[in-house]
Amino acid sequence: MDLQKIVKQNVEMDMTPMIDCVFLLMIFFVLVIDLSQKNLEDLILPRAEYQEPDDQPPENRPIINVLQSGAVVYEQNVVYDPTVHGKNYAPIKQLLLDIRRQGLLTGRLKLKEEKVGSKMVPLIDDPILIRADKWTEWHYIGEIMKQCSQPDIAFWKVELAMSEQDKENPKKRTP
Amino acid sequence: MTALDDAQEEAKGDMTPMIDVVFLMIIFFICIDFKVLESKLPAYLPKDKGSQSDVVEPQEQLSVKIHVESAGTPIYPEGVTAGTISPNGRPYRFKLEGHRVKWEVGPKPLYNLADVQKELVRIAQDPASQVPDKETGGKKLMTCVIEAYPGTYYEDVARTTDACNAAGFKEINFGGGLGAK
């Protein structure tokens, strides 16, 4: 009988280390896998000196990433690649049209009639964010902006992403 | 003697929770570095593009031109050439060294962003920079148009826009059609 008791006592497992491990894993994944950042490409943005942080970004804001090569990435898919498409910017236009159509269908984006000159013009009243690497040639971003201002797309509120710190030169503060 | 031994045994602390907490703090501080806060620069594009046939009255505006002085040299990580794909499926990025630009704020040539900022503030505070506001009937600060010439990068334009915003210019437009270098 005594031997049986001893055997039973030894079988009881200490759960504390397992719970500790589970908590560690939970914290790790919560911090690393931030679902709100899945649309953000790993880019080095120019450092903002005067702007306020974008700490409460609107959920419905479309985010367009532009890589150094000029490639346009939306929701992790390369939509336009200069090496493939060259000066054919039709994929960018199509992407913006799709964002607009999808946004209006789901109610994520809203149209607003504004008086421009003598006419009432329907404009998308929500902003679109362009995130480009600091060493991306400007004309690629200019092309996206040009497409945004077309009357059939009409994203007139464009936001350019910048960073609180220069990740390329963390210590060097340029004037 | 036996009581003293017991007391000594009780005084031994369990180190496990402390090690757990240390690990938690290490993970927290490693991960917090990944999240660098981003800022946004608002820019408003023309609302009337292609949508009206009215004759547009000429408006007084401030032109800020960005010209390339030195194109710079792209520096890739060691052993990497242009176009090499990194493990994340995107091309390796380069760092541009020796890239220099020159600004023209109105007719005035300037060679660093701090001077551009000062000049923009001076213009913004000048009463002559106020133009009639058709919407309110009052006055407003003139529009600032940033014209980036071929060979300029997002860094050049974004930081110039940032300076314009800081100087108080609310309406910032971008001169287009200047194309690639």
Image: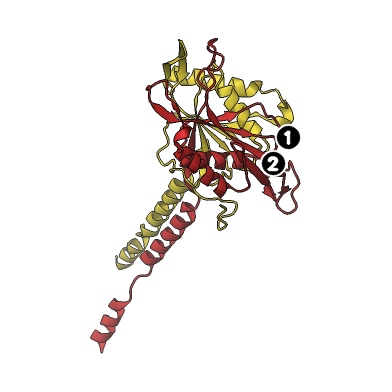
Rendered image quadrant of residue A90: top right
Residue that numbered label 1 is attached to: B181
- From the rendered image, report the letter of the chain displayed in yellow: A
The correct choice, above or below, for B11 with respect to B53 in the image is: below
Q: Residue A115 at what x, y percent from top left?
A: 43, 15
What residue type is disc 2 on? Val
Say whether residue A77 is visible.
no
Q: Chain of mark 2?
A: B
Where is residue A171 drawn, in percent x and y? 55, 58
Q: In the figure, the red chain has which letter?
A: B
Q: Secondary structure at mark 1?
A: loop
Residue A108 percent across, percent down from the top left? 43, 23
Residue A87 makes an appearance in the image: yes
- Residue at image mark 2: B68
Using residue B175 as the reference point, say whether residue B6 is left or right of it.
left
Work out which residue is located at the far front of the displayed protein and give it. Answer: B128
Instruction: For marks 2 and 1, give the one nearer the viewer.
Output: 2
Report helix, strand or loop for mark 2: strand
* Type of amino acid at the residue the image marks with label 1: Lys
Q: Is residue A60 left or right of residue A70?
A: left
